[in-house]
Amino acid sequence: MSDEWDREGPYGHPVVATLVGGAILVLAAVLGPHFCEPVPLPALLVGGAAAGLVLWLIGFLVTTRHAGLGWKLGSLALLIGAGAGAALVAHGQFQTRSRADASSFADMELGTDGTPSLPAGAASRGPVSSLYLSSIKEDQAAVRAYGEALGKFGAGALTSPYMLQQNPQVIGHCGDIAQVRALAAEQSMARLARRKALAEAIGGASLPKAAKLGIAKIAGDAQADPLLANQQAMLDATGELCTLLARKSWGNANGYFGFGSGSDAAAFKALSARRQAIAKEAEALDRAARERILAGREQVRTALSRSIYAGE
């Protein structure tokens, strides 16, 4: 009785069919990640094994059906195993590319003013890094534009009787504070849109859940913007202060506002306390943002220190 592994039949070429199928799987594993979106490892393994089965069926119809039973079963096992192996290779490539992207957040630093700073070449590390770098630049531009709008309105003059005497026109246009409010609202909408785009990019990255959560923590909440509420509260108080000073019941009392009206003096004191409280809230928001970014960075670093084949 002949050995099943040695009897290929008149037209059976299982070795060639298996090698061709394996080569196709290798090419798919190497080239696929460059053209496809990241896929979770379990789905990749199932898909790789299924691809191996499909290639075996094609080879079976073309030639392997003429081979012995040993070759039929052996080539089936080899191609399914090769498909799973190709899935692991593809997963490694997806992870390598995504981890290069995520490394920008592991390597980031904070400036003395709390502004995030990404490493050189971060924009080329991946889509999330590129989006976040653009977001940082746009946030900085928004801060400058907001400051310029406040300066144009003359908000600084409302804090000093000397400055107000030098720039008295501000109290003649208190209603212009509405333009600054509109700018703040517009900037908030743009800020949330940037965060939403970042959230979508983070969700589509082929990364462990812990790394995604860390990057999302750095990026900020895409649903709420506490900065806007703080800005609007300060603008409201500034508008009320402008209206109060427009009554011109004040004078320069050695560098401080002095009021001839007791009610105006009390209102000024209350507004000053309110503005100070709002300013402290702004400082607390800045501190919370720094702490959030640093915590997110450590979360990303920890996640990237694990194997690419480790679980979530």
Image: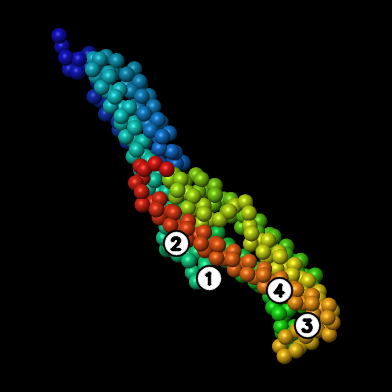
Q: Residue at x 34, y 31 (%)?
A: 83
Number of numbered callouts drawn: 4
Residue type of the residue flagged with mark 2: Met
Per the model, the C-alpha gap separating discs 3 and 2 is: 45 Å
Secondary structure, mark 1, is loop
Residue type of the residue flagged with mark 3: Pro
Residue type of the residue flagged with mark 4: Ala
Q: Tell me which numbered mark, 3 or 2, is placed earlier along the sequence.
A: 2
Q: Are marks 4 and 1 in contact (CB under 8 Å)?
A: no
Residue type of the residue flagged with mark 1: Asp
Per the model, the C-alpha gap separating discs 4 and 1 is: 25 Å
Residue pointed to by mark 3 = 168
Foreground residue among 239 and 145: 239
Q: Position of residue 115 (x, y in %)?
A: 52, 66
Q: Tell me which numbered mark, 3 or 1, is placed earlier along the sequence.
A: 1
Residue depth check, mark 4 versus mark 1: number of the one nearer the observer: 4
Q: Residue at x 77, y 71 (%)?
A: 239
Residue pointed to by mark 4 = 273
Per the model, the C-alpha gap separating discs 3 and 4 is: 23 Å
- Image disc number at residue 113: 1
For this orientation, the residue located farthest to the bottom is 254
